[in-house]
Image (spheres, rainbow, N blue to C red):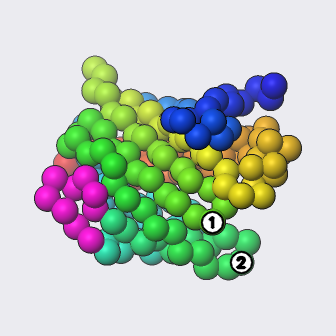
Amino acid sequence: MPSWALTTHGVSHDPVMRIANHVDIEAPVDTVFRWITHKNRIVQWIPNLLKSRITRETAGRIGTSLRQVCGVNHRRVEVPIEVTAYEPNRRLTVRMRTRKQDTVIDFRLEELRSATRLTRVAHIRFVGYMKLVGLLTGESVRERSLRSCQQQFDRLKRLSEKEAATD
């Protein structure tokens, strides 16, 4: 079995890749939460995200839908997103479904003494022929995902800490 976590999800028994990482940010939890939840801020720390727009907003945020346009391999890809969990200053969970994968990303925020710990756990279920591709290339997918997330976290940390320093 590869070193990345391969589990079954629900009753489907489809393989699910679990990728987790975290970052400590020297900023208040509400500052960090604004950076991960506001559509105009998200595009500043996710490098390949070109734009994000809300297509349906709900009270309490759970069920809110977004469309994000990402640059992938010199192409523009539109990704539908749904908010599945929302707890102000504590948690944001989103689900993204494309023809190739069904991904759930859970962001959790924890107040530390002088910082905020942001933990990101992604569960990726490959769809169709990508199930086989995912099994064959899982380790490289995991490594690319971790590198990409680290770049995103570095930007998010810099932006959040800069804002906290000016407040």
Which residue is more in the foreground, 72 or 85?
85
| Outermost residue, left side | 59
Which residue is more in the foreground, 121 or 157?
121
Label 2 sits on a secondary structure element that is: loop
Mark closer to the chain start, 1 or 2 = 2
Q: Which mark is residue 141?
A: none
73 left or right of 70 in image: right
- Residue occupying image coordinates x 44% and y 33%: 119
Q: Which mark is residue 74?
A: 2
Q: Position of residue 35 (x, y in %)?
A: 33, 53
Density class for disc 1 (Cα within 10 Å; few <14, some 14-19, many ≥20) is few
Is residue 8 located in the magenta-colored stretch of the structure? no
Q: Is 159 rendered above or below residue 56?
A: above
* Residue type (three-letter) at the residue carrying disc 1: Arg
Magenta part of the protein: which range? 56-64
Q: Position of residue 38 (x, y in %)?
A: 30, 60
Asked if the residues shown at circle 1 and circle 2 are in contact, with their CB atoms under 8 angstroms apart, the answer is no
Q: Distance between the Cα atoms at labels 1 and 2?
A: 18 Å
- Residue occupying image coordinates x 75% and y 55%: 130
Density class for disc 2 (Cα within 10 Å; few <14, some 14-19, many ≥20) is few
Is residue 61 located in the magenta-colored stretch of the structure? yes
Please identify the dominant SS of the magenta region.
Answer: loop
> Can you say which quadrant of the picture contains the N terminus?
top right
Q: Which mark is residue 99?
A: 1
62 left or right of 153 in image: left
Q: Residue 71 falls in which quadrant of the image?
A: bottom right
| Outermost residue, front side | 11
Label 1 sits on a secondary structure element that is: loop
| Outermost residue, top side | 113
Q: Position of residue 156 (x, y in %)?
A: 44, 49
* Residue type (three-letter) at the residue carrying disc 2: His
